[in-house]
Amino acid sequence: MSVAIQTIAELRGVTKIFGDVVAADSLDLAIGEGEFLSFLGPSGCGKTTALRMLAGFEKPTKGEVLLDGQVVNDLDAHRRPVNMVFQHYALFPHLSVSDNIAYGLRQQRPRIERKIISAKVEQALETVRLGGFGPRRIWEMSGGQQQRVALARAIVNEPKLLLLDEPMAALDRKLRKEMQIELQNLQRQLGITFVLVTHDQEEALSMSDRICVMEGGRIVQVGSPRELYDTPRSRYVAGFVGTSNFFDATVTDASPNHITVQMASGRQLHGTPEIPIDTGQAVCVSIRPEQIALTRAERAAEAALPVTIHNRIFLGEHTEYLARNEALGDFLVLVPRQAELNEGTFNAGEQAFVSWDEGALLILEK
């Protein structure tokens, strides 16, 4: 029996217009209490505008923003049970770490006693693994430590909603991965609802309970990382969430669970529809590079297609090949390290064969 999740924040038909630009267009989204939700999309897609309307830094042109079931369109940011961690942290360089974290508590009315503020600051520092760093100045802290200070300053006020605006954009790859794990652990520990804005698909996939994919100010699909990766509804989502190969085709035979399509070259392929598809419809065929098997002639399946290897890029845990088939054209194949050790390395110009399970081929709208 599934347990109903209480909605803590909601966007209802929210639109935001700046002059002639529609930054957010009719957004409808319910955010569950205690979940980790990410807004994912390229620059200018509207994700930061949506976040700023939740925070109270922007008011919607149309629609309603709700927190705990109450419309908060006209409620100022500092009166909402929401805190935000900005991309560049917005820390005060002239204050110590402790004073930065305590700043919000000292603005509250009625005033909080100093000893209570000190205790809350110390607890926040311990939570983000910065115990003993209180007296330090911000400029003495590394980038990762500064991010933890910004997180401590945000959680010390015990918000119901913590908004994160690309907080790891300035960190190097290794530190970013470490902070992704820390943020996940922190969210589980505190039970606070986290809403992250990012253009980094790997970041969204690795951290989120749900991802809201946006394009041109609109929400195009919302789902778990696995749902968006395995069953995207459009070419845009399939291309933005992970890497995929795309082929244009026309449907020649359609049923609810099986579709046959024909390429311009005449080659027929069989796949699974993710949306209702009609016979004669122009569609996009998608297949993930890691779902394609690359083999030599003696190991090739009966239905395997011949290819020529054009490029090979060694990436450590896997190798990326650019292969070409006369009917399909160029496409990527991702071979895990162990599979390549078993099969042997393929070199540019070498002939090989590719194959995949029918369920790996997704039929999408163009």
Image (tube, rainbow, N blue to C red):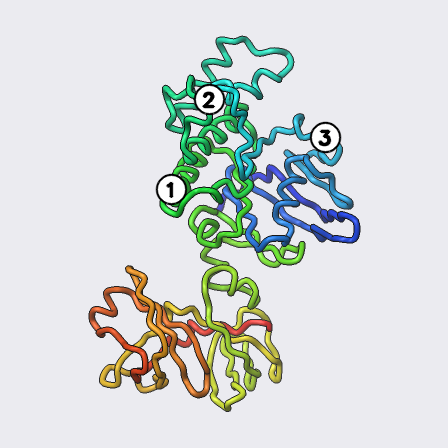
In primary-sequence order, the first of circles 1 and 3 is 3
Above or below for 175 versus 192: below
Considering depth in this image, is 250 or 20 the residue closer to the camera?
Answer: 20
In this figure, which residue is indicated by the disc labeled 3? Answer: 75
216 with respect to 193 (left or right): right
Residue at figure coordinates x 41%, y 76% from the top left: 358
In this figure, which residue is indicated by the disc labeled 1? Answer: 175
Residue 186 pos. (x, y %): 42, 34
Residue at figure coordinates x 37%, y 67% from the top left: 290
Looking at the rendered structure, the kind of residue marked 1 is Leu
298 with respect to 4 (left or right): left
Q: At numbered mark 1, what does the secondary structure look like: helix, strand or loop?
A: helix
Residue at figure coordinates x 57%, y 11% from the top left: 112
**Splitting the image into 4 quarters, where does residue 67 fall?**
top right
- Please state which of the two labelled residues, at mark 2 or mark 3, is closer to the viewer: 2
Q: At numbered mark 2, what does the secondary structure look like: helix, strand or loop?
A: helix
In this figure, which residue is indicated by the disc labeled 2? Answer: 97
Count the numbered circles shown.
Answer: 3
Looking at the rendered structure, the kind of residue marked 3 is Leu
Residue 72 pos. (x, y %): 71, 34
Q: CA distance from mark 2 to mark 3?
A: 30 Å
